[in-house]
Amino acid sequence: MRGPGEAERPLRLLSVTQGNWGERIAQNIADHAPADWVVLTWAAPRLIPPIVDDPEDFLPSELPQADLLLALGDVPGFAQLIPDIARLCGAQAVLAPIDRNSAMPPGLVSQVRTWLE
């Protein structure tokens, strides 16, 4: 992610959670991450409709800058916010639980992947 000649700096990880499942994962990462990582968390709204027309209704005006976004949502509406969250925090990579069909149905996985490209 860094170009030649760029100084090494700690990884900046933003975990975005939406419930107990994501909060537990984010806390475990924060507890066990390398000492030089910057690990931040933002708790997304717990109630997000299945279809999100206006993402800004559910997002803060700004998020801390991050190299990696860990998206730990519980519902498909959250998954629709992932590209906007990635843009807000400047993430170069996104990790999301695509094996949780209740949170990210297969068709939505494809859509989110396309939106991120």
Image: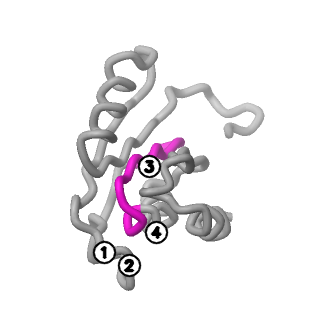
The residues colored magenta run: 65-78
Q: Are marks 2 and 3 in contact (CB under 8 Å)?
A: no
Q: Residues within 10 Å of mark 4 (few under 14, many from 20)?
A: many
Quarter of the image for the N terminus: give it: top right
Q: Residue at x 23, y 61 (%)?
A: 45
Label at residue 80? 4
Q: Quadrant of residue 77?
A: bottom left
Of the numbered discs 1 and 3, the one sitting upstream in the chain is 1
Q: Is residue 69 left or right of residue 53?
A: right
Q: Amino acid at mark 2?
A: Val
Q: Residue furthest bottom?
A: 53
- Find disc 3 in the rendering and name its residue: 71
> What is the tally of numbered marks visible in this picture?
4
Q: Residue at x 43, y 60 (%)?
A: 85
> Marks 2 and 3, Cα distance to the nearest angstrom?
16 Å
Mark before the other along the chain sequence, 3 or 4: 3
Residue 24 in the image: x percent, y percent?
Answer: 29, 32
Q: Nearer the viewer, residue 114 or 64?
A: 114
Q: Which residue is mark 1?
A: 49
Between the C-alphas of marks 1 and 3, the distance is 17 Å
Q: Which mark is residue 52?
A: 2
